[in-house]
Amino acid sequence: MRIIDMVCPHCGANLSVDADNKSASCEHCGAKLIIDDEAQRVDLENAEQAGYAFEKGRQRAQEDKADRKGAFPAARKVFSTRGIVYLAVLVALEIVLNRFLSINTPVVKIGFSFVPIAIAGMLFGPIPAAIVAALADLLGAFLFPTGTIFLGITLTAVLKGINWGLFLRKKQTVATIVPAVLVDQLILSYLLNSFWLSILMGSPYTSLLATRIVQTAILIPVEFVVVFAISKALGKFGKRLFA
């Protein structure tokens, strides 16, 4: 008996087989292997194609596992050409919604500029969503200035992107959307942005809180309904974007 070591081309398992035999079976995947007497090696017909099929199957299994957890396949392709294009579209959409399709006053802002950032968080995760939020805030301020650029507001935008990504990247359910909306509106928009505005405008912090409570009360249910609807739509059609 001559024992040789080899690797199964089907599953990649390490095997020890009797070289005196004409064939062997992989104890891991059951594949039948033909042993070449002269070279004392595995000579599996179409081994290259089999190895390619195995690698594709492994990648597909990983994608299916991620999908079962609620993760969109887009996250693995964030820095692909298509992923960068999608991020740029989200930046442009945020600028349009924020600068032209929102109710803006120095103190109160009501609109749907949160939508592109939430989508970026769902599809790509916290860091790309934060980048989208920061670029949209800075580019919007440079291209369509409405006042003084204040980096505190930009910091809040970054934190908003991180918030959406942390809560919604893996799962988009009521249990994840509700805290994401509450953090976005109560902590970041209401408390933190009111603080920045008090510094920027020289107004008392408590007065701004009293003024902005109506905005927060309106946007909490609006954000929840819109983000919930978007998550359902992306669950059906989001994978096609990166097919």
Image (spheres, rainbow, N blue to C red):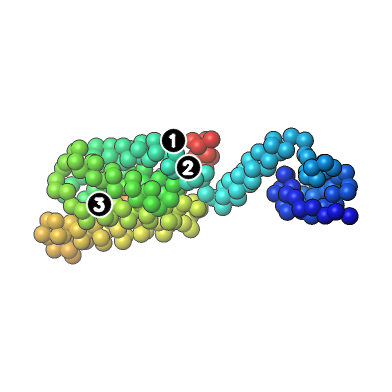
Q: Earlier in the sequence, mark 2 or mark 3?
A: 2
Q: Which mark is residue 98?
A: none
| Nearer-the-camera pick, 100 or 154 | 154
Residue at (32%, 40%) from the top-left corner? 91
Q: Which residue is mark 3?
A: 154
**Kind of residue at badge 2:** Lys
Q: Earlier in the sequence, mark 2 or mark 1?
A: 2
Q: Secondary structure at mark 3?
A: helix
Instruction: Residue at the far front: name it.
Output: 38
**Kind of residue at badge 3:** Thr
Query: Between tags 3 and 1, which lies in front?
Result: 1
Q: Which residue is mark 2?
A: 77
Q: Secondary structure at mark 2?
A: helix
Does 93 appear above or below 157?
above
Residue at (18%, 65%) from the top-left corner? 206
| Nearer-the-camera pick, 68 or 73 | 73
Residue at (79%, 50%) from the top-left corner? 26
Query: Between tags 2 and 3, which lies in front?
Result: 2
Quadrant (top left, top right, bottom left, bottom right) of the N terminus: bottom right
| Nearer-the-camera pick, 151 or 80 | 80
Task: Determine contact: label 2, label 3, CB under 8 Å.
Answer: no
Structural crowding at the residue carrying mark 1, measured as other residues with C-alpha within 10 Å and reported as few (<14), some (14–19) or many (≥20): some
Q: Secondary structure at mark 1?
A: helix
**Kind of residue at badge 1:** Arg
Q: Which mark is residue 82?
A: 1
Q: Disc 2 to disc 3, how far (Cα)?
A: 26 Å
Does 14 appear above or below 232?
below
